[in-house]
Amino acid sequence: MDWWCDMARLSLWLPPFSPDYSGASAVLFDLKTVTAMHDASGCTGNYTGYDDPRWYGSHSGIFCSGLRQVAAVLGDDEKLIKKMEAAARDIQPDLMALVGSPVPMVIGADLEGIAVELEERTGIPSFGFDTTGTAYYDRGAFRAAKALMDRYTAKQAAKEAAIERRVNILGALPMDFGKGEEIRDFKRFLAENGYETGLCLAMDYSLSDLKEAASAQVNLAVSRFGFLMAQYMEQRFRIPYLCGFPAGESGEKAWLEALERVRETKHSEILNAVEQKDGTEDMSVLIVGEQVMSNSLRYALFRDMGITRVTVGCLYGPEPALTLPGDLDLSDEKKIRQAMNRPEYQMIIADPFLKVLLPENTEKKFLPFSQYAVSSKLGEADSARAAGVQFNEWFKRRTSK
């Protein structure tokens, strides 16, 4: 039975999506770290070559432990610790981290325990993340970001008072936002409307930004990873959040109004399309992708295009609080194929790699909207800006073809 369940998740056409160890490494990328992915180099290559476009030309301290068969069999942790100590002497990092991969999972390596030993020897704050490569990037990112926040933000939280109109952006990962152009546009949009960006987790941020994260009035969750962090920070630091991305011209205005409400009332909101309009076109759309961005695109279709029959298919599993009735868990290739080929959907919005799951003679309209976690640099030609009127222009251009 276990074998049959594993075979049901076999992918024949799609590549593996960005895993948890890549998410954890992406969170550490901007900090002055010695980060070692504990593997034989394949997983490290996946992250640096395909999952994070920032790596080439950067000075980020992402290394491979060079795990070999003898070390795996004998459990030689001392060799790994010695390598980390040598790297620390050369780089003088602010912190060090060990990131797991499938082999450490199989042999039962205790990366958290090794990190404790490493910190005792060096005096440098050290973290161990028992990521496995079997979960998706948002889970690894959440694990790493939470550990950092527990270590650094919690110490400052009691001293921090909320700064008027300061916000944190939570969930900015290259797996969702590529090289970060849209996040930079988002920051400009916030500044133009009188908001100051504090922490931008995890793109273009520093350790000092992390330490001062509890001073924000509102957290802005722009992905599922961001939503998980926003929930945690609301519980830990009592900071309300707005979950969603300002997609579409009308959607952008509604998002800004929601931000003002959250700031004034201190009650968190999730921006999602729950209303129905009468007299709209009878088109049914399936959006397949990351859940928060997909919800935001649905909201834009509803507010700007009057399309109310929109289903979100969640590639990485649905978060219950973000899910509307009828939304789908599309966490394996078989489910994605079945959903995309259901006759009720006339239009599909998804990463271009997913188009192969449709028959060549299909009459369905396929709108490619790439996500780096799926198609990496190969999907860059179909990358799209969703913020504000840019989404309206993209939708008009794609549907006119």
Image (cartoon, rainbow, N blue to C red):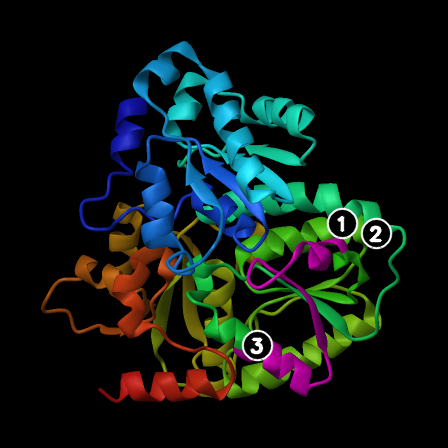
Query: In x, y percent, where is residue 252?
Result: 58, 82
| Residue, far top | 74
* Residue type for callout 1: Thr
Camera-side residue: 96 or 220? 96
Q: Which residue is denoted by mark 2 in the rendering? A: 157
Verify CB contact (< 8 Å) between mark 3 and mark 1: no
Q: Residue at x 39, y 60 (%)?
A: 57
Q: Residues within 10 Å of mark 3 (few under 14, many from 20)?
A: some
Looking at the image, residue 373 lies above or below residue 394? above
**Sequence order check, earlier mark of 3 and 1:** 1
Residue 247 sits above or below residue 349 on the image: below
Q: Which residue is found at the position 54% from the left and 75% from the top? A: 184
- Please say if the residues under marks 2 and 1 sit with CB atoms less than 8 Å apart: yes
Q: Amino acid at mark 2?
A: Ala
Q: Residue furthest front?
A: 90
- Nearer to us in this view, 116 or 135: 116
| Residue 161 appears left or right of 32 | right
- How far apart marks 3 and 2 lie (CA) works out to 26 Å
Disc 3 is placed on an element classified as helix
Q: Which mark is residue 186?
A: 3
- Local SS, label 2: helix
Closer to the observer: label 3 or label 1? 1
Membership of 255 in magenta stretch:
no
Q: Are the residues at dot 3 and dot 2 in contact (C-beta closer than 8 Å)?
A: no
